[in-house]
Image: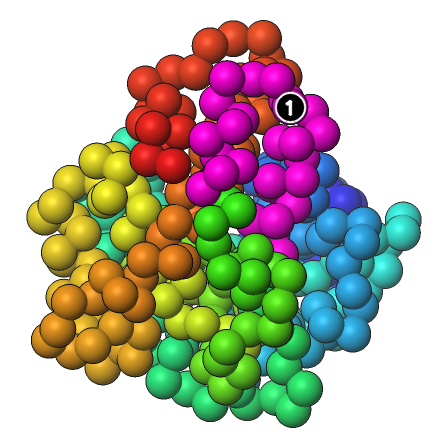
């Protein structure tokens, strides 16, 4: 992957192969993705089961929305060692060590703009948020069935409507959604201080826009996100004309189901990780399970 990113970064060089002084780094290495940076180029190897046609449509969608989503360097994914690989310009991520500078307003504004934009590509796939949540619950059932935190999470999941569990069609097939919004999905491009843009198109598609607000909503409901940060996010989304919640009325009728789904998903992952490590739940993980 590193060599592949290097070759892409220097594809326009005309001097031939020479030693390269550029830095290289592995940004992520998970079962569902490997991300490698070389100079200003980032190569991402997607999950082994990624659907080629759907990923191609998602990447093409990003290419059509350059002011909202980080545009790809190439519109078409390529194949490498049995994985689909996409190429992107490097952007500066959110600094996790400065939480007070978290770009909640920028995230909300970008989401509102995305939700207001008609899908620019025919045949846009369905947003994968509910599908990913269902996978987390399946993993919990199979790997930690007897953990004391499992039962309340499964009860919360079972109480959700079928569409939120990925078991029925989405009730909204016209609104473009990100599908996995959190602060790790924003970068400044051009680096280091360009405008904020959304990244990671793996779950991009049409669906219920409130799903994109559900993670911060769930964190707020669990006491993990301070009220002022939640209010900054929600206010910015409304000010930008976001359609997921009413402009003035109570937002929770729209947010309730997606927020409960994200709470169950996050709690399921927490219990699964704790069980695999043979350790008790920490304070945050307890809060997530208790919220179920």
Residue 222 sits in which quadrant? top left
Q: In the image, is residue 144 part of the stretch drawn in magenta? A: yes
Q: Main secondary structure of the magenta part?
A: helix
Residue for point 61% across, 18% down: 146
85 horizontally vs 192: left or right: right
> Please, is residue 33 above or below residue 120 in the view?
above
Nearest the camera: 123 or 154? 154
Pinpoint residue 109: horizontal percent, then vertical percent.
26, 71
The residue singled out by tag 1 in the image is: 145
Q: How is the image coloured?
A: rainbow
Q: In the image, is residue 207 part of the stretch drawn in magenta? A: no
Q: Residue furthest right?
A: 81
User: Where, quadrant-wise, is the N terminus in this rendering?
Assistant: top right
Residue for point 45% across, 72% down: 208
Residue numbers of the magenta segment: 130-156
217 horizontally vs 71: left or right: left
Pinpoint residue 238: horizontal percent, then vertical percent.
18, 74
Visible in this render: residue 18? Answer: no
Pinpoint residue 289: horizontal percent, then vertical percent.
40, 29
121 horizontally vs 119: left or right: right
**Local crowd size for mark 1, using a 10 Å CA cut-off: few (<14), some (14–19), many (≥20):** some
> Please, is residue 224 above or below residue 132 in the view?
above
Pinpoint residue 68: horizontal percent, then vertical percent.
40, 74
User: Where, quadrant-wise, is the C terminus in this rendering?
Assistant: top left
Nearest the camera: 198 or 205? 205
Under circle 1, the secondary element is loop
Visible in this render: residue 167? Answer: yes
> Please, is residue 129 above or below residue 97 in the view?
below
Nearest the camera: 283 or 63? 283
Residue for point 36% across, 85% down: 116
Residue for point 89% across, 51% down: 82
């Amino acid at each position: 992957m590193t060599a592949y990113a290097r070759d892409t970064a220097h594809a326009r060089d005309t001097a031939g192969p020479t030693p390269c002084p550029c830095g290289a780094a592995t940004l992520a290495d998970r079962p569902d993705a490997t991300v490698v940076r070389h100079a200003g180029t980032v190569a991402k190897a997607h999950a082994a089961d990624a659907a080629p046609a759907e990923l191609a449509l998602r990447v093409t969608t990003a290419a059509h929305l350059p002011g909202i989503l980080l545009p790809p360097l190439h519109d078409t994914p390529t194949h490498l060692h049995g994985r689909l690989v996409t190429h992107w310009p490097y952007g500066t991520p959110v600094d996790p060590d400065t939480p007070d500078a978290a770009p909640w307003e920028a995230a909300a504004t970008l989401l509102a703009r995305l939700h207001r934009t008609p899908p620019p590509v025919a045949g846009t796939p369905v947003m994968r948020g509910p599908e990913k949540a269902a996978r987390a619950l399946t993993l919990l059932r199979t790997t930690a069935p007897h953990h004391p935190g499992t039962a309340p999470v499964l009860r919360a999941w079972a109480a959700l409507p079928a569409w939120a569990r990925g078991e029925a069609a989405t009730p909204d097939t016209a609104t473009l959604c990100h599908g996995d919004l959190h602060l790790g999905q924003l970068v400044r491009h051009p680096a280091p201080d360009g405008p904020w843009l959304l990244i990671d198109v793996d779950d991009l598609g049409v669906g219920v826009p409130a799903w994109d607000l559900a993670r911060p909503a769930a964190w707020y409901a669990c006491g993990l996100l301070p009220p002022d940060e939640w209010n900054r996010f929600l206010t910015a989304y409304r000010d930008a004309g976001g359609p997921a919640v009413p402009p003035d009325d109570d937002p929770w009728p729209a947010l309730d189901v997606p927020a409960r789904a994200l709470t169950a998903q996050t709690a399921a992952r927490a219990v699964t990780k704790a069980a695999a490590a043979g350790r008790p739940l920490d304070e945050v993980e307890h809060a997530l399970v208790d919220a179920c």
